[in-house]
Every structure is written in structure tokens, then in C-alpha cells.
Image: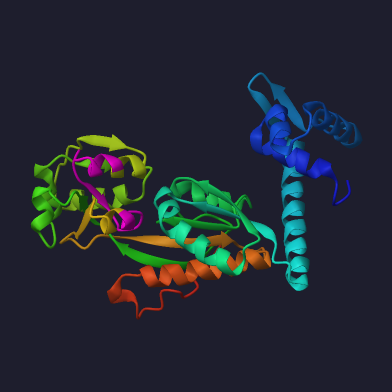
Amino acid sequence: MHLHSRALKYLDEVTRTGSIRKAAMSLHVTPSAIDRRILLLEEQLGTAIYERHASGLRLTAAGEILAQHIRRTLQDLERTRSEIEDLRGLRRGRVSIAVIEGVAIDLLSTVLTEFGKSYPHITFSITVAPSAAIPTLVASGEAHIGVSFNSPITRGVRRIASAELEIGVVMRPDHPLASKKSIRVVDCAHYPICFATTSISVTSVVNDALSQQNIDLEPFIMCNSVETLKALVRDGAGLMFKSRLGIEREIRNNELIFRPLVEKLTERLLLIEQSGRKLPPIASKLQEYFKDALATMEMPRNRGAHPRKRLGTIE
């Protein structure tokens, strides 16, 4: 296989989608063209690459090895092209980003808008996923940069920067608790609460506080979408526990308000990259924009504590 072979992209897309038909639609080629490439390569290797099932294609053990090689090759090719184009001053390329839902609303749009002013020809691929899934997307090379809350330690991921954000109570301006400057967790027990499921990181922090104080809260609504919860609170369904991240616009428009908790609960927003591999130059530049954004978000009492300090590699 040549470095520039279309078979590399064909196989990578089939592996990603699990379907020849879906890969063909994504790459704007015929399914038969991709199928021929697969059959030819299987003949050359003398072994099957995929197991064919009614639900789609699944990699064989040999296919797993080949898929990892293809992904590394495509990553290296992308980085090499980006470096060459950077030297030529073209400033072209594509950066893939994996972010949690709250980040996608305000932080991401702010960073990309500002970045686009200096690098207007760069394109982006954005994946929105739960915090627990972000490190896996970065470690596998599917995303150059990851932004998540309280991510679990994952092999092959390096933490680049972080910001500690205060968790508070989010509600409508006409809520009975809105007149308070700060709110105790127990105060919220008397009102309907729109609670995030455990797939959203803030929940574990709040649950720990509830457990320590022996407080039993019965959620009015449980939901795995921050945006849905935000809409419910905005419409008067109740209140929710959250940091300010992702509700800045609603606060400016006086649709929602944020009140800090007396318990001083926090969560950490992390900027991560794949360890052991060099980012393409343009992805590194974008990473600097994210670092600056996280530095300005750090809680005031911690701004003197080097919020942009690089953290160690997790091997």
C-alpha cells in the first residue's frame, strides 16, 4: 500500500462506521469500489480483515492490527502535510476536537471564532460526547484535542491545562431562592430539581456532597442532556446544579441566574491531548487558544496558582 493510497481512507472509514455503505456515502464513492479494495487487500494479506454480519462489519484480530497501522499512518500524513503547508504559509488543515456538551455551546464557539480571525482557512471536525468518553477519543487519535470535566485517568493521554470551576445552583430569576447570594445544598431540597444523570460529571460531585450531609434529594426530572436540563429550568420546571460554563448567554439575557453553593463545590475542566505523538502545527496553535480560554475561566482565588501549568503525562 502506498502512503497516498485511497485504500487507507476507505478502510479507515469502514472501520469507523462499521459499514461499507455508510463509508461510501461519507467518501462519495460507490460501495463496490470500497468492497473491491477490501477483497484485494485480504487476498494480498492472505487473511480476512473484517467479519461480515447482518448488523455490519467487524474487525478480525488481523484487521485490528491493520486498522491501528492505518490510523497512525493517516495521522502522520496529516501532520506532515500540515507542517509543509505551514512552512508555505497556506495555513490550511483540519483539526478534530472532542468536547462535552456544555463546552460546545459557549467556550468552543468563542475559541473557534477568535481562532478563525487569524486562521480563516482551517476547518474543524467536532465530536460532542460525555466526559468519560473524551479521553478514549483522544487516545485513539480520533480527536487532536479533548475538553472534558473530571476525566478519568486514561492510558495514552496527557493533560495540558485545566481550570477549576465553581458549581452552583442555576434557576430562573423569579425563583424563590434567587434572592439569596449563596445557597446551601439542603435549601434546594424544598424545590423541584432537574438532576443530571451520572453520565454528566457534575452529578458525582453533588452526590458526594449530599452523601456527606446525609441529604436525600428526590429529583423531579432526571436527564442525560445538559441542554435539555437547561431548557427545562429556563421554562420553570425547577433548578439544577451546574457551573457557569454553557449558560453565559442565558445569564446575559436574564433568562437564568447562577448562585454559588455555600459548600464550595467545584469541578475541573481539562484540556487533553494524546501522549507520545506530536500534534500537527495548526492543532498546536489551536491548543494555545484553549489554554488562554481556560486560564481566564479559572476561579479568582486560584488565578495565582499557575492555571496554565502543564500537567504530567499519564502512561
Q: Is residue 37 left or right of residue 113?
A: right
- Which residue shows up at 77% across the image and 57% down it? 77
- Which residue shows up at 51% across the image and 62% down it? 113
User: Residue 19 lies in what quarter of the image?
Assistant: top right
Q: Position of residue 217 (x, y in %)?
A: 16, 41
The outermost residue toward the right is: 44
On whether residue 241 falls in the magenta region, the answer is yes
Which portion, as a residue range, is magenta?
Answer: 231-249
**Quadrant showing the C terminus:** bottom right
The outermost residue toward the bottom is: 304
Let me know if residue 104 appears in the view: yes
- Which residue shows up at 50% across the image and 73% down it? 310
User: Residue 296 lies in what quarter of the image?
Assistant: bottom left
Rendered view: 223 above or below 294: above
Q: How is the image coloured?
A: rainbow
Rendered view: 121 above or below 102: below
Rendered view: 71 above or below 59: below
Q: Position of residue 253 (x, y in %)?
A: 27, 55
Q: Position of residue 71 (x, y in %)?
A: 72, 49
Q: Is residue 184 left or right of residue 165?
A: left
Q: Is residue 188 left or right of residue 109?
A: left
Let me know if residue 196 appears in the view: no
In this view, the residue in front, 230 or 309, is 230
On whether residue 105 falls in the magenta region, the answer is no
Figure label count = 0
